[in-house]
Amino acid sequence: MKVTLHVWRQESSEAEGRFETYAANDVSPDMSFLELLDVVNEGLIESDVEPIAFEHDCREGICGSCGVVIDGSPHGPHEGTATCQLHMRSFADGDELWIEPWRARSFPIKKDLVVDRGALDRIIEAGGYISINTGAAPDANAIPIPKDDVDAALDAATCIGCGACVAVCPNASAMLFTSAKVAHLNMLPQGQPERWSRVARMVEQMEAEGFGNCTNHGACQIACPKEISIDFIAWLNRDYLRAQRKVG
């Protein structure tokens, strides 16, 4: 199959960006989207053209570094699928695809399709951890936890921090990411001693990073490759209000 790619190229955060067009021939339907970019880059290198910069690591839908916007959709056309898990059989022979980086003020473009997602790291640094002594593993395992709480915490913990929720949100909100990172700790016994300070610090850091407010569009849970529910945002809002009384 053949596809035409219109790829966003930008040398640095200060440079002016533009779309450039590349033809990809003899594309295997079994290629992943990142493998397609690899093949295009091989051709560019042979032609002494700067290859397209894009992020990747595990290529197994775990690390969250691979995200790009494909035809206006973060990670591409399928729900519950990261860019690295997207295969070219999802497209038709002769398709034209528009490839862009995440678009958000809090994700400045570093080069081409690569953005700086350090803002998400700083939200986690503000409180997304347990710093108290919770004892050894047998002690933790001896604490009975309702199955519903465990299941919810594990659902939240599947967040890979890719930033698709921010990229798709018309307000560039990071509420789905932040709520998942808060909830998977605050829902478990080990997270209780720091529960209120954790949610207060992480929400305040999120706001300091310049992310927009959540207005319940719901697009974030559709774009999320791990299909994390916006129910966690409601849970976060409730905990944050309680934290204001307890911490503030």
Image: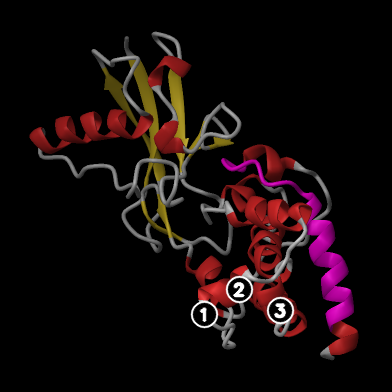
Spot occupied by residue 136 in the image (x, y as percentages of width and height): 52, 79
Q: Would you call the spot at circle 3 few (<14 residues within 10 Å), some (14-19), or many (20 or more)?
A: some
Amino acid type of the residue tagged 3 in the rendering: Glu
Numbered tag placed on residue 204 in the rendering: 3
Q: Which residues are magenta?
A: 224-243
Direction from residue 187 to residue 70 in the image, left or right: left
Residue at the spot 68% in from the left edge and 37% down from the top edge:
222
Are dots 2 and 1 in contact, CB under 8 Å? yes
**Image position of 49 with respect to 40: above or below:** below
- Quarter of the view holding residue 246: bottom right
**Image position of 171 with respect to 19: above or below:** below
Mark 3 vs mark 2, foreground winner is 2
Q: Which residue is tagged 1? A: 136
Q: Magenta part mainly helix, strand or loop?
A: helix
Direction from residue 93 to residue 36 in the image, left or right: left
Residue 228 magenta: yes
Residue at the spot 52% in from the left edge and 31% down from the top edge:
76
Spot occupied by residue 147 in the image (x, y as percentages of width and height): 74, 53
Residue at the spot 69% in from the left edge and 82% down from the top edge:
201
- Quarter of the view holding residue 248: bottom right
**Image position of 123 with respect to 11: above or below:** below
Amino acid type of the residue tagged 2 in the rendering: Ala
- Helix, strand or loop for disc 3: helix
Direction from residue 75 to residue 24 in the image, left or right: left
Amino acid type of the residue tagged 1 in the rendering: Ala
The CA span between labels 3 and 1 is 32 Å
The CA span between labels 2 and 1 is 7 Å
Q: Nearer the viewer, residue 167 or 197?
A: 197
Residue 206 magenta: no
**Which tag, 3 or 2, sits closer to the chain's start?**
2
Q: Which residue is tagged 2? A: 140
